[in-house]
Amino acid sequence: MFLLILGILLWMFAHLFKRLFPSLRARLGNVWKIFSAVLLLASLVAMVIGYRGADVVPVYDTNPAMYHANNALMILAVYLFAVGGTKSVLVGVIRHPMLWGTVIWAVSHLMVNGDLASALLFGSMLMWALLEMLLINRAGRWENRVKGSFKGDLKALGGTVVVYGIAVGVHIWLGYNPFVMAPA
């Protein structure tokens, strides 16, 4: 559990540093970018190892029927991640598509995982994404300058299919088939 918590804290620190300490971040320049990349990589490794190694400690019961909702929400979450990296029409409508994708990802996983490690990981990522959006919104008004096209949306849709397929494959490889409901 230590590695999981360490990974979560490193992730939050690396992402929130820019918002909480903007002048220090500006002074550090490219040094911070490199350090931040290393921190984020370390945080991901620590979270994965910590999550996989955590004991299963039940916290709340889940409904096996939620697996279908989880899968549908995950398609939307992956699409929002993809849209955030394109010049799509949707990017001009939704502020913070990647962070909203994180919110949906976290909520969908909390619906089907009722153990302590899942509550820590997905609950923390949910809180982080909401806090990040709050801090960004407080920093200034949104002036969307992206002139997206439906071509960008189609690219995001294609990317969604590929990434969702990879995510499903990785989950199955790790022993968590998202299409098979756990016993009640």
Image (cartoon, rainbow, N blue to C red):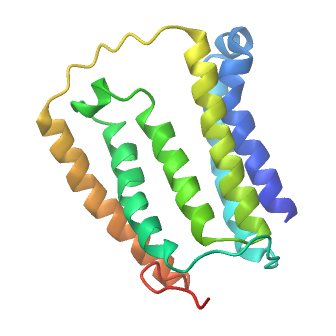
Q: Is residue 86 left or right of residue 67?
A: left
Q: Is residue 174 left or right of residue 151?
A: right
Q: Is residue 133 left or right of residue 91?
A: right
Q: Is residue 168 visible?
A: yes
Question: Is 57 rendered above or below residue 125?
Answer: below
Question: Is 119 rendered above or below residue 79?
Answer: below
Residue at x-position 27% and y-position 53% = 159
Q: Quadrant of residue 96?
A: top left
Residue at x-position 45% and y-position 39% = 98
Q: Position of residue 146 (x, y in %)?
A: 27, 19
Quadrant in the picture for the C terminus: bottom right
Residue at x-position 31% and y-position 30% = 91
Quadrant in the picture for the N terminus: bottom right
Residue at x-position 48% and y-position 83% = 177
Q: Is residue 142 left or right of residue 113?
A: left
Q: Position of residue 149 (x, y in %)?
A: 14, 30
Q: Quadrant of residue 47?
A: bottom right
Q: Position of residue 106 (x, y in %)?
A: 58, 54
Q: Quadrant of residue 165?
A: bottom left
Question: Is 2 rendered above or below residue 7?
Answer: below
Which one is in front, 73 or 132?
73
Q: Position of residue 39 (x, y in %)?
A: 70, 42
Residue found farthest to the right: 2
Question: Is 105 rendered above or below residue 18?
Answer: below
